[in-house]
Amino acid sequence: MADTRRRIWSMAGLLAAATLSSGLLTTTASATEPDMPEAKKPPIVGGQPAKIAEHPWVVYLTDTQGNQFCGGTVAKANKIVTAAHCVTGEQPAAVQVVAGRENKQSTAGEVAKVTGIWVHPRFQNANSGADVAVLTLDQALPHQPLAVAAKQDAPLYQPGKMSTVLGWGATAEGGQASQTLQKADVPLFSDQDCQKAYPQYKADAMVCAGLPQGGMDSCQGDSGGPLVVENKLVGIVSTGNGCARPNAPGIYTRVSTYHDDVQAQLGS
Ligand code: ARG
């Protein structure tokens, strides 16, 4: 997994990739004002603690030691939607899913074993699209699943629409993963604006979200986690240039494009 992530970072043009540690949800303003004294820095922009009770379908993935490395979404009691780059090449036994646990240090919720990993057959890397995977669990989780956006949900992808991203990843670029679940409300970009920020952008496979001025974003460790609009899974945290930088929104898997493939994995 570490190799995969390092590859993805370099493809996203991250020169400092080697120094970045695995982490999650970023709400930093330091990218825009690096020299601001600590005390004068604006507070975390947009990001805030989130409650499992309000987002029961958000989960995180760990290795067998319990180290969190990605996020995910309950799409059916025993099925998790996540990013392909989180689990490609992994054995099911190497991955666990933690549900119902806001704080990584608590023992709340469930720890499920993974019995199957489906990676989208067209996935190669996060910059070429199809960054979606479905995990099968050894148990049915008691958490309400989140509906997966379908073709007819195109209105949910309107530029400017507010979306919510959730995760336990880094709270600053290059920073440590969060101990607790965080969320940020970020507007969706138009395809045109995202294309300007990322030449590799593919409108059918991806959707961008963030602030043009930066300051609010997902980050390392948030990968695989949900981007939600009107109670539907519209995106999966995939990649981006750094975190929360100006003119560098987060890139998310456009879930509606893959709805039928995902639904086939969920069964009826
Ligand atoms: N690839 C990262 C991960 O594996 C997620 C990066 C998201 N970046 C962003 N700027 N939104 O955790």
Image: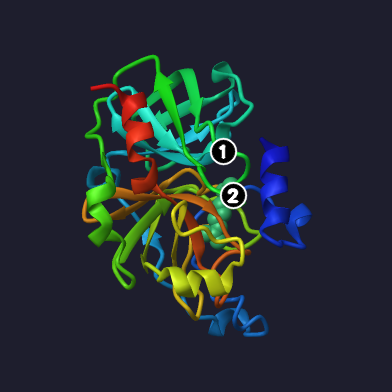
Q: Which residue is mark 2?
A: 128
x, y percentage for residue 12?
A: 66, 59
Quarter of the figure that contains the N terminus: top right
Q: Is residue 20 above or below residue 214?
A: above
x, y percentage for residue 90?
A: 61, 25
Residue flagged by tag 1: what amino acid is it?
Phe
Residue 93: image quadrant is: top right
Q: Which residue is mark 1?
A: 123
Q: Is residue 141 above or below residue 165?
A: above
Q: Is residue 146 above or below residue 140?
A: below
Q: Is mark 2 within 8 Å of ligand 1?
A: no
- Give the CA distance from mark 2 to mark 1: 7 Å
> In the visual, does 76 lie left or right of 21?
left
Residue located at (34% from left, 16% from top): 139
Assign ligand 1 to one image quadrant. Answer: bottom right
Q: Is residue 82 above or below residue 20?
A: above
Count of numbered marks:
2
| Contact (Cβ within 8 Å) of mark 2 with mark 1 | yes
Residue flagged by tag 2: what amino acid is it?
Ser
